[in-house]
């Protein structure tokens, strides 16, 4: 029996190592799931086509949008919001997608062209064998006026976003913006001042389009239309909160059990894990940037 036990020890050690490596590459539980508090919305009830209608198709409550040489496609929420929870479950296309952006974002560009606010979740297309990069970004008043001040944070996800649907969301209220992936907070952007926080009503958008000039490794790899069409699938749409027409008494949505907003300690722990293990770019730590215009980066 002693010799049998000794012979099993290497296998036991291997299993321990495998188990620890799996746990090391998966975030801890956030302990709270805000998406479960929001009822899914029928696409046709909450959204309308914005462009490329011939490049959209609805099958079994899932919307497919695609890009080819002719056009990309985009959609927009019917209502503008001044705060809320905004999400969708998205499945990306595998293979060569360099130069292609798949997005879910808030914006008021149509209401304030050249002087708009925007809060982005963007998937940057990739080449064969390389993982997708998820980029989050915040623009405040004037991102199109020649003085673009991006606040990009980029992540390599802990799962393959092409193998199934995962839920991506933006929670925006007057105090903070929280980006979530499968209910795990990956970024919190607090309001430090009115000058660095979007406060005007925005619409929710989704789109797929050609951004070859910058999307993949700063434009090194372009969209190659021999691999067209490039597609993405969206389902489980969620958009709830205070619309631009709501009463002033409308209470903003929270990302945690705290009605006043903020995150729990467990949610912060999950977010710190993601930022330690999955973040690959943080604008505040890019010393080539002029941070005089991003005071939230100051210590």
Image (tube, rainbow, N blue to C red):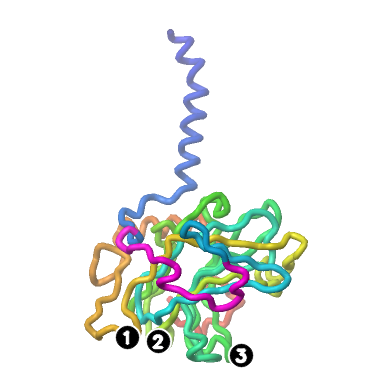
- How many C-alpha atoms fall within 10 Å of the one at disc 1: few (<14), some, or many (≥20)? few
Nearer the camera: disc 3 or disc 2 = 2
Q: Residue 161 appears at what percent x and percent y?
A: 55, 54
Q: Is residue 219 left or right of residue 91?
A: right
Secondary structure found at label 2:
loop
Q: Residue at x 53, y 56 (%)?
A: 157
| Residue occupied by mark 3 | 146
Q: Earlier in the sequence, mark 3 or mark 2?
A: 3
Secondary structure found at label 1:
loop
Secondary structure found at label 3:
loop
- How many C-alpha atoms fall within 10 Å of the one at disc 2: few (<14), some, or many (≥20)? some
Q: Residue at x 52, y 57 (%)?
A: 278
Q: Residue at x 52, y 63 (%)?
A: 58
Relative vertical location of residue 54 with respect to residue 275 in this rendering, above or below: below
Q: Is residue 184 left or right of residue 115?
A: left
Q: Earlier in the sequence, mark 3 or mark 1?
A: 3
Q: Give residue 93's quadrant in the image.
A: bottom right
Q: Is residue 217 visible?
A: no
The quadrant the C terminus occupies is bottom left
Name the residue furthest right: 226
Name the residue furthest top: 1
Q: Earlier in the sequence, mark 1 or mark 2?
A: 2
Mark 3 to mark 1 CA distance (whole Å): 32 Å
Mark 3 to mark 2 CA distance (whole Å): 21 Å
| Residue occupied by mark 2 | 200
| Residue occupied by mark 1 | 245
Q: Bounds of the magenta span?
A: 36-56
Relative vertical location of residue 32 with respect to residue 176 in this rendering, above or below: above
Whether the magenta-drawn stretch holds residue 86 is answered as: no
Instruction: Confirm or deny contact between disc 3 and disc 1 (CB under 8 A).
Output: no
């Amino acid at each position: 029996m002693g010799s049998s036990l000794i012979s099993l020890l290497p296998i036991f050690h291997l299993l321990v190592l495998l188990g620890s490596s799996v746990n090391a590459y998966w975030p801890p539980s956030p302990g709270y799931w805000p998406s479960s508090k929001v009822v899914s919305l029928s696409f046709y009830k909450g959204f309308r086509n914005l462009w490329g209608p011939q490049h959209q198709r609805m099958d079994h409550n899932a919307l497919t949008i695609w890009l080819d040489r002719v056009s990309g496609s985009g959609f927009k929420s019917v209502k503008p919001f001044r705060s809320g929870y905004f999400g969708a479950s998205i499945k990306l296309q595998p293979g060569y997608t360099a130069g292609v952006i798949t997005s879910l974002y808030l914006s008021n560009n149509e209401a304030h062209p050249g002087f708009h606010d925007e809060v982005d979740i963007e998937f940057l297309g990739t080449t064969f064998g390389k993982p997708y990069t998820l980029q989050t970004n915040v623009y405040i008043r004037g991102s199109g006026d020649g003085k673009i001040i991006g606040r990009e944070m980029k992540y390599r996800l802990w799962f393959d976003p092409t193998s199934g649907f995962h839920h991506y969301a933006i929670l925006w209220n007057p105090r903070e913006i929280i980006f979530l992936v499968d209910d795990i907070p990956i970024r919190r952007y607090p309001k430090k001042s009115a000058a660095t926080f979007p406060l005007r009503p925005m619409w929710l958008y989704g789109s797929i389009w050609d951004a070859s000039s910058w999307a993949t490794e700063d434009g090194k790899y372009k969209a190659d239309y021999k691999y067209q069409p490039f597609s993405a699938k969206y389902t489980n749409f969620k958009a709830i909160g205070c619309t631009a027409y709501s009463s002033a008494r409308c209470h903003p949505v929270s990302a945690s059990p705290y009605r006043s907003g903020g995150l729990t300690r467990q949610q912060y722990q999950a977010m710190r894990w993601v930022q330690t293990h999955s973040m690959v770019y943080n604008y505040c730590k890019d010393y080539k940037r002029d941070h005089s215009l991003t005071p939230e980066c100051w210590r």
